[in-house]
Image (cartoon, rainbow, N blue to C red):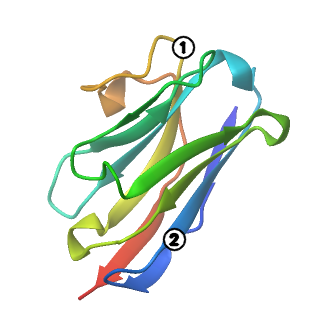
């Protein structure tokens, strides 16, 4: 099982980045794919997720209206388009997979699979 996050980098305030999460080793369609982030000195924060069947999505209040999650089942890849980035978006971003749901309040340590993170730095 592998989840590979990529697309992080350094961007100025107001800029955009698109993160990708490429999955392999499990049935992609059966899993909820989530993005979490962890800023220095802080706990993991659930940012967004996309459901396994109906493709329903969730966004945290802090990114609602700025981030868009999408899923390409043919490529086993989930994307997180991040626009209007702010310095407070600076964090390591992780993608995860679980088989039970996409909802507010998910815990990072309560996932089925985890990928290595990708660093997003937003300069002011």
Q: Nearer the viewer, residue 83 or 29?
A: 83
Residue 87, horizontal then vertical, whole percent: 24, 76
Of the image marks 1 and 2, the number of the one nearer the N terminus: 2
Residue 85 appears left or right of 114: left
Q: Residue at x 34, y 80 (%)?
A: 14
Q: Pointer 2: residues within 10 angstroms few (<14), some, or many (20+)?
A: some
Secondary element at tag 1: loop
Question: Closer to us: mark 1 or mark 2?
Answer: 2
- Tag shown at residue 17: 2
Extreme residue toward the left, this view: 41
Q: Please state the horizontal and vertical placement of residue 115, each as a whole percent of the image.
A: 55, 44
Q: Are marks 1 and 2 in contact (CB under 8 Å)?
A: no
Which quadrant does the N terminus fall into? top right
Most extreme residue toward the right is 74
Position above or below: 64 against 33: below
Q: Residue furthest front?
A: 65
> Residue 83: which quarter of the image?
bottom left
Residue drawn at x 58%, y 25% is: 55
Residue 52 position, x and y percent, is 61, 20
Task: Kindly indicate the quadrant of the structure image that contains residue 86.
Answer: bottom left
For label 1, the residue is: 99
Task: Classify mark 1: residues with Cα within 10 Å, few (<14), some (14-19) or many (20+).
Answer: some
Note whether 55 is above or below 46 in the view shown. above
The residue closer to the viewer here, 115 or 15, is: 15
Q: Is residue 39 left or right of residue 14?
A: left
Q: Residue at x 51, y 24 (%)?
A: 56
Please give the name of the residue rendered at 31% of the width and 83% of the height, measured from the top-left corner: 13
């Amino acid at each position: 099982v592998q989840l590979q996050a990529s697309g992080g980098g350094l961007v100025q305030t107001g800029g955009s980045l698109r993160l990708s999460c490429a999955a392999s080793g499990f049935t992609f369609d059966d899993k909820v794919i989530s993005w979490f982030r962890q800023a220095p000195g802080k706990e993991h924060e659930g940012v967004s997720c996309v459901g396994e069947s109906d493709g329903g999505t969730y966004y945290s209040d802090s990114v609602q209206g700025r981030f868009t999650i999408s899923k390409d089942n043919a490529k086993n890849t989930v994307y997180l388009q991040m626009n209007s980035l702010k310095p407070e978006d600076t964090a390591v971003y992780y993608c995860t997979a679980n088989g039970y749901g996409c909802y507010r309040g998910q815990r990072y340590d309560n996932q089925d699979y985890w990928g290595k993170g990708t660093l997003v730095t937003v300069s002011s």
